[in-house]
Amino acid sequence: MPEIRHSVCALDCPDCCSLSLTVENERATKLRGDSTHPVTRGFLCGKVAQYLEREYSPERLMYPQRRVGAKGEGRFERISWDQALDTIASRLRAIAAEFGPESVLPYSYAGTMGLLNGDGMDRRFFHRLGASRLDRTICSEAGVVGMTEALGVRYSTEPEQFRHAKLIVAWGANILGTNVHLWPFIMEARRNGARFYTIDPRRNRTGAAADKHFFIHPGSDTALALALMHVIIGENLYDADYVERYTEGFDTLRQRVREWTPQRAAELTGIPAEEIVALAREYATTRPAVIRLNYGVQRSERGSMAVRTIAFLPVITGSWKDVGGGLQLSTSQAFQFNRAGLRRADLQQKALGREARLVNMAELGAALNTLGHPPVKALVVYNSNPAAIAPNQNAVHRGLRRDDLFTVVLEQFQNDTADYADILLPATTFLEHTDLYLAYGHYYLQLARPALPAPGETRSNVEVFRALAQRMGFDDPCFADSDDEMIRTLLDSPHPYLNGITLEQLDREHFVRLKVSNEGTPFQPFAAGGFGTPDGKCHFRAEELDYTPPVESRHGDAQLRQKYPLELISAKNDDSMNSTFGHRDAVDRSTAEVHLHAADAASRAIQAGDQVRIYNARGSCVLAAVVDETVPAGVVSAPSVRWGKRAPGKGNVNALTSERLTDAGGGPTFYSCLVQVERIGD
């Protein structure tokens, strides 16, 4: 008889879906969204709806392997787990003895959002070893800093409240591609008369479905936000009572934005001044109005300031008072776990007597090639594919090819990074192990137990790092913790949002809403102030607000612009998740394209379907031209992230992106990238 089992999608997406599997004879035959979950609501995105194809793919890695070819060739031979673990432990021990333990660098991100397999036993292991710490900035850190600078704490409007809005602005947010479970709430609002606008350098599927799309020049979002405030404050459209009660520094803000006229912003953003004025008036006078701000905005050189200034808009309009108003960027900070108990950073004292050095993951190319005192001699990669996703790809590949670099990769498929491994270990999928999940697009905490047996010799990250700790002789009791003990540690938090939530409840119910508000009551974090500051007020600190165009932009370095006149946006591909599904032929085809405006194509004698070379001083890649109206003149868009191993020249768009960092937070500047495009052949 078929059995229905529960799981949770572990992919890096705000929706964090609750899953329902139909299982017969320990094999899944159907995967659906859980109809009882208030946000998942019984459906899945296109990529996860096909996840069983990945689960049962003949390309899955099933046993440990050792490299037998040159680095990057991807030739391996099968070995046992004992051989693999002994080799890793002996090499790490020898490297730490000769160069110091900080010569070992872990590299991971959100290949799984599970806390145990992404933020648990692995952290304990590397802390106890004394390895270099990884500054995990690759996705959201600039936005995290910007939002925190603005509001003091990163709480957001619940997705369920979007149904009450009368104006919804998706700013740098491709909801249909990367947050699809918000869409039904938006559609409900639109059926009730709401208007839906999008602001983005490209008109993606979400923009095509909007009532109005605003094409904005890449990286100029701060200028637009300041100009919107210029109009709202200058025309007295702000909420004077809310501002008086719950903010500090408004008079300075008034003076600061006076110089940011719509005309000035129009020159920088490409949005006509009259449209900026109209948007400001409509936003300020429509109640409720909500902004869905996503992380694309902060992947530019001025990205942190962009998030900070945009986050002030619902403050000055008092939009946080309204059910269905406010702003959503991330809900993740509401999940106030006992992360210190899980990660055990105190173990560094045992290894080093101090904190280990911090290496920014967005600067991996530099770390592998030029970092000293000590140099990186061992790299352990899990939950990530840096050979494909890290910026300045040619430098990253050069570092990965080093003969003196010992590289371990934990993976499910032989992706770009796996080809460089010395030891390649087979990892379980999220359907095959226990984990605890927060969300960054809603407020439901979720637990998943193994829904399917782990195939072959695959092991979870928790199992691997637990076994490595034993091989290394780490006898600290925490390395013997079971999965359930680690979950109990996480839940052992004094924060009221987790009050009373237990492992037993999660086992029974699968998902539990955080105690962010009384049952049946919407969560309005800033309706009456309550900002994350000592006095509970929003402090504008307007003297810090400013905008300078990114170096790599149409208004940046003029000499660079002359050589490389096009601004490249390498936004997320709708049908994949960063590089996770790069083994699929359909994904490879969709990430092998570049979109150009007709004017830019014509001036280069490029026609639809032509193979083109995109290049700058850092590198190049080859893609197929798509000539359409999804981007304005001067902008090109290439969906990311293709497996470079499947591409001509073995590179993708990250051969073009730089290691320049954002204005705050140390994030990568993927979307501040100047390029040139030329047709290949006669």
Image (tube, rainbow, N blue to C red):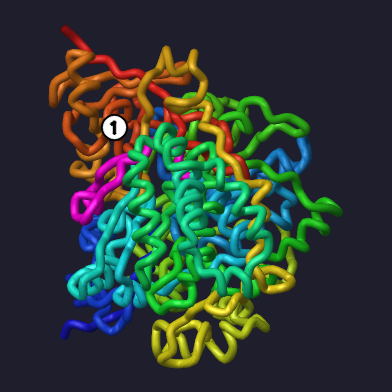
For this orientation, the residue located farthest to the top is 682
Image position of 98 (left or right of 381):
right
Q: Where is residue 257 in the image (x, y as percent from the top left)?
A: 56, 47
Q: How many labels does the image show?
A: 1
Of residues 646 and 85, the one nearer the viewer is 646
Give the vertical position of 290 relative to 579 (above or below): below
Q: Position of residue 122 (x, y in %)?
A: 60, 58
Residue type at numbered disc 1: Arg
Give the vertical position of 93 relative to 679 (above or below): below
Binning the other alpha carbons within 10 Å of mark 1 as few (below 14), some (14 to 19) or many (20 upward) gives some
Q: Quadrant of the C terminus?
A: top left
Residue that badge 1 annotates: 646
Q: Which residue is drawn at 27% across and 27% down?
A: 633
- Stretch in magenta: 201-221
Q: For residue 31, say whether it is visible.
A: no
Q: Which residue is drawn at 40% across and 17% down?
A: 564
Q: Which residue is drawn at 52% across and 83% down?
A: 516
Q: For residue 276, say whether it is visible.
A: yes
Of residues 638 and 500, the one nearer the viewer is 638
- Image-quadrant location for residue 500: bottom right
- Image-quadrant location for residue 415: top left
Magenta run includes residue 592: no
For this orientation, the residue located farthest to the left is 608
Of residues 486 and 89, the one nearer the viewer is 486
Q: Which residue is drawn at 52% across and 60% down?
A: 118
Of residues 226 and 337, the one nearer the viewer is 226
Image position of 424 (left or right of 579):
right
Q: Position of residue 511 (x, y in %)?
A: 41, 82
- Image-quadrant location for residue 624: top left
Q: In which quarter of the image is the N terminus?
A: bottom left
Give SS at disc 1: helix
Q: Position of residue 421 (x, y in %)?
A: 49, 38
